[in-house]
Amino acid sequence: MQAHPAGEHAAQVAIAHGGSGMPTALVGMLLFIASEVMFFAGLFATYFNARATSPGEWGPPAGAHELDLPLAAVLTAILVASSFTMQFGVWAIRRGDIGKLRLWTAITLGLGVLFLSGQLYDYSVLGFGIGDGVFGTVFYTLTGFHGAHVFGGVVGLTIVLARAWRGQFSARNHVAVEAVSMYWHFVDVVWIGVFSVIYLLR
Amino acid sequence: MATTTLEPRAGTYRRSWVLDWLTTVDHKKIGILYIANSFLFFFAAGILALVIRTELAVPGMQFLDQATYNQAFTMHGTIMLFLFIIPALSGFGNYIVPLQLGAPDMAFPRINALSFWLLPLGGILIFSGYLFGGAAAEGWTGYSPLTSDQYSPGVGTDLWIIGLTLVGMASILGAVNFIATIFKMRAPGMTLFRMPIFVWTVIVTAVLILLATPVLAAGLIALFIDRNYGGSFFDPSVGGNPVLWQHIFWFFGHPEVYIVILPAMGVVSEILPVFSRKPLFGYKAFVFATIAIGLLSWSVWAHHMFTTGSVFLPFFSFMTALIAIPTGIKMFNWLATLWRGKLMLTTPMLFALGFISMFLIGGISGVMLASPPIDFHLQDTYFVVAHLHYVFFGGSVFGVFAATYYWFPKMTGRKLNEPLGKVHFWIHFIGFNLAFFPMHQLGLSGMPRRVADYSPDAGWTILNVASTIGAFMIAVSVIPLLINVVATFINGEPAGNDPWEGNTLEWATTSPPPPYNFDSLPPIHSERPLFFLTHGHGHAAARPEDLEEDPGDDVERRDGLV
Amino acid sequence: MSDTVVGFLILGIGMLVVLGVVFAISSRGGAPTARAQPPKGVHLPGPSFLPVVISVGGALMGAGLAFRGTDQLANPFLAIPGLLVFVGAVIAWVRAANHEWREAEHTSHDDGATH
């Protein structure tokens, strides 16, 4: 069988490493994020359809609190800030600065936890639940699944922080950091969508 | 671990084959697991089909009650689509795609295994409804408000939801794996337009799975919340909208049917050139037609909802008719591939030809249904049942059988017996048409679908009897296949590397391939690397342009796409 | 409730019996076989139980959701073991992946291929 003996072994290695360009693991994360975007698209579709077809006024049921826009705005600021801090961490490790990576990842993690706590606090004072009419259902489903994704991101950040603590990243090799940061930005963008649609657009 | 020093006793070891298969991350073994698992579910859902047909053969409730009948057709549809056809095609994709790309495995081998193991578990959950008061019984489409906890209070529907969600997650992970593999792990020299056509159909399918299945997941979760946590997505009494379910379901559901058919089209496009001794006619047109079908599939979902009164008919009718164009291009390419070829009517070729003819009929009935005036009369009748079986069964399942006979030698090192294969094909083909062609007429004369019984005065009896006979013929046709597989395992004729004189890289290695697939790769200058390796440039081909390739090419060249 | 329990016992015991029989027959093991080595420089994960374990954990959690009692989020007897299995398996997976990445970094590449 005719082959190119000299170049072929390099070829096999090249294939397994994904050759040049974006590391394979990042391609995988990007694709996964695409599927999650479609998941939220489905949930947003239920929100818009419910809003369009449900009779009467659109909002929390009678007797419950109005939506807390200021709190939501604060949560938005927290999450957007955390995207910035995450990106600072990525830039740091691209320069090889693992110390700064640890710092920025810890801050991002803290902001993420703060966001989740704020979300849970909001849930506790709202006064209506998922079973209280269609607004309640779509509100809790949309924000709840977003919160679950934030939690997943927080888990990822914890793992990255732990590995950074043990010095397992370098400028040349930090795919996990890039992957988690992509996911975190995605979670932030979805929140901006959720906030705009539920709190601003009403 | 494979290459590291973590394994304390590297080298020889005794290992139970059960553990071997339970822990494998080798795409070839996983592919075989997918295929074997799918065929088990095929037989289970096939038995349900026989149950349905036996009940329907003559008027009067023979041996089922309505509730059991409803469970039967629901489970039949759900299992056939989600646990047979898609996993079987996935299994062939899993086995063949890395080989056709010249890669040692998929991009994420362990996630590949995870995608598989979620399937039997999801299937068990779905089926287990039978043990807990009744399986889901609302049709594989699960329309609300029938699926609400008010009208379907049993746990069977919840198990259906959960099981399908698990299966959906498995699909999504699989899609990520396929796309990453195809973009990142092609052998040097294999640009995108030199990939085998089967790989093209797999990647377009994977993109559809990646983007459509999450929408189904959203809908299933919404339904679960409605049923269990007092949600109001689909409950009109508290402001919800039952038609919302149909929108969400069919926004997934229509790309889903292209997910089901595209890989089978890829299989057929691999087989026809090999057994016509001619290259695929119009490779690039075929690629663009596949992409066009993938894109258009997002714009037609409401043609399943014409009769709800909630959708804009002209748009969806127009877009649906538009899909006939790329499909027609493919038909033309297949026929042109056959034209003046040296046809070899082996069993895989027979199933491929059967695919073309049966899918043509299914496509025509589909275009008929795309017209709202016609659809308003035929919605929810047996005409639709005929259409969907001609495309799913006459299309995809014929594709699965074609793939089985074509790639069995590669996977096992032995060729299946040809005469037995032909017996399987002919009984299957005749039985299939006998079972499903009469359903066109039944639908046109008004027989509704999903009914357990019908009036003896309706005049539908004789066609139902014919259909039932056809269904049993299909069942009988499986017997030569089973005998063939067992006998070939015991004492089959060795196949060698390339029993069919194929064109693509999977035939450039042993049958079955070694664990990391290739000891050496041939140079890749065209989409038929093995053809040129075997036949070289001096070969007298049917037409000089069949020998075209890029001789001056740098064999190390790859696309820098990602 | 007892219907559910009976159903689970049938499913669970049935599966264990089938697996046990198959295991007993097959673990009479054949001749020692060499573990295949990939080409030098190609790093692929070796065999692993984790995909099966994660799937089982996921299925248990799912079953817990399906078999919930009224006013429960999920059935704790299914969902909690499922969650533990799932989380444990994910942790094991991450640790194994970590390990492999570090091994991949530290084994020498004398084949001339660039990273």
Image (spheres, coloured by chain):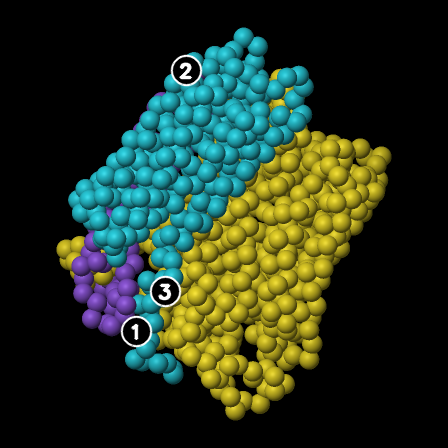
**Chain B, chosen colour in render:** yellow
Percent across and percent down for residue B306 are 75, 38
Dot 2 alpha-carbon crowd within 10 angstroms: few under 14, some 14 to 19, many 20 or more: few
- Give the spatial CA distance, label 2 vs label 1: 61 Å
Image height of B122 relative to B281, above or below: above
Q: Evaluate whether residue B34 shows in this view.
A: yes
Dot 1 alpha-carbon crowd within 10 angstroms: few under 14, some 14 to 19, many 20 or more: many
SS category of the residue bearing label 1: helix
The residue that disc 3 covers is A20
Q: Evaluate whether residue B468 shows in this view.
A: no
**Chain A, chosen colour in render:** cyan
Dot 3 alpha-carbon crowd within 10 angstroms: few under 14, some 14 to 19, many 20 or more: some
Question: Quick one: B453 or B439, which is closer to the camera?
Answer: B439
Q: Residue at x 48, y 34 (%)?
A: A192
The residue that disc 1 covers is A9
Provide the letter of the chain coloured purple. Answer: C
SS category of the residue bearing label 3: loop
